[in-house]
Image: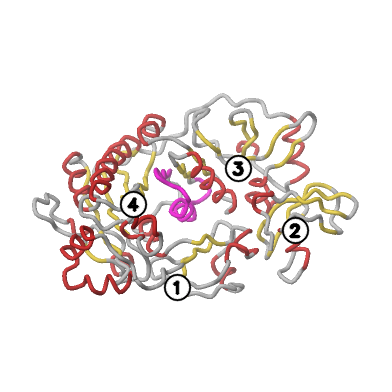
Amino acid sequence: MIQLPADYEQRMKQLLGDDFHNYCEALNQSPIRGFRVNTDKIALSDFLSINPFGGQPIPYVDNGFIFDYEKVGNHPFHHAGMIYVQEPAAMAPAACVDIDPDWHILDLCAAPGGKSTQLKNKLGPNGVLVSNEIISSRCKILTGNVERLGLHNVATTCMDSAKIAATFADTFDLIMVDAPCSGEGMFRKEAIALEEWSQNNVTMCAKRQGEILDNAVKALKDGGIIIYATCTFSLEENEMTVDRFLQRHPDFVLAPVKNKVKESTADGIFFEGCKCHNITDARRFYPHKSKGEGQFMAVLKHTGTPPPPTKSKVVAKEKIPQTVLDFLQDTLTQFDIEHVKLYNGNPVYFTPNFTIPKGAAFCCGITIGEVKKNYLQPHHQFFMAMGRKFRRKIELSLEDKRLSQYLQGEEIPTDCENGWAVITVMGCPLGGVKVSGGKAKNHYPKGLRFNG
């Protein structure tokens, strides 16, 4: 049985009333698990025809499922980036609004990357995602997930919200603010959230959330949207934070969410002194009402007129080393030379229509590799994101013993021609090898290898 702090229990009784008993019962049930199909890697219909995990569809996420499958992280489909494991309630904020495929999106508090990768699946080839995380160790995890899913036109950054606002002023059509919070909605999933809860932490989080939202405004285009989300229940961090924001920023309104999200959530709570007449348009995801953990979300819409599309500032392009171009010609069947650039001295593949200032990104687009003295050493991200365009492919079925050998870092036999090749499973890139004389030398990163 989960033992709630007395102060927290009293607060929740006031919020939930007669529903408090149902909430407590839900807390003592097992957490709900979910996953999304990464539609940047595989079409939903194609995945469903081979889906080994089963699962119940999530009503507000077309490519989301509730499931129960042990050690999913060891499955080759997970290694290949076909899926992203994510708690169902956490999928709701990114499903609140319709997203234009050409938008520029910022995820301001992004690690480990669930909402970022969900947003990216909604963008087209001209859309751009900047995914930011202030803590460097978590930014590495975020970047690893972007890499595993093989996503294009994503830059990961490691800045505080004020620096992001200064670097990308008036830039984004949509900003996700999944703000650091007291974590009340995660009590049955993460024991540390329960251990660290205090009224002082709630107050501190609410102050920080307001500062983050104010900085988000500076990075937003006129007419843009901020989706504010937390995984907590406190009024101070949720409706009160939204109400104070709207008072500070009268050029914003609280907008309704899409119907499918509304149907799976409860209304926002009107509190004494609330100035926002439609605060019930904010949404609350409760574990005793829907399948998932706790979540709050609010759509904050700027009432200004969106600016006309503008071309990115022309930036003098550094000369691409011939070694890089020769490698791409030999390795890929097709690539766009305009997307090949140098970022902080390293060759990357990233849209020419969005400028990331030098030094601003932890990772800018797809890292092609590292230029050595007279050759290029490809990066794992290059195989994962560009693998479908490789000239040399080695397809391994789930029944092929070479698949597990590859994931364990072993060299495998092949009849593929010599050169850099991509390993695929069900057509999806899994990683790279260097083929020579009938043997494929393993280049799957040591930190990702499966030892079991």
Q: Residues within 10 Å of mark 4 (few under 14, many from 20)?
A: few
Image side of residue 272 versus residue 220, left or right:
left
| Residue receiving disc 1 | 57
Point out the tag, 1 or 4, that comes first from the N-terminus. Answer: 1
Residue 268 covered by magenta stretch: no
Place of residue 88 in the rendered image (x, y in percent of width and height, measured from the top left): 41, 65
Place of residue 279 in the rendered image (x, y in percent of width and height, measured from the top left): 18, 56
CA distance for labels 3 and 4: 38 Å
| Residue receiving disc 4 | 196
Point out the tag, 3 or 4, that comes first from the N-terminus. Answer: 4
- The answer to whether the residues at label 1 and label 3 have Cβ atoms under 8 Å apart is no
Q: What are the residue bounds of the magenta stretch?
A: 104-126
Q: Amino acid at mark 3?
A: Ile
CA distance for labels 1 and 2: 32 Å
CA distance for labels 3 and 2: 23 Å
Image side of residue 451 versus residue 125, left or right:
right
Q: Secondary structure at mark 4?
A: loop
In this orientation, does residue 97 appear? Answer: no
| Residue receiving disc 3 | 366
Residue 122 covered by magenta stretch: yes
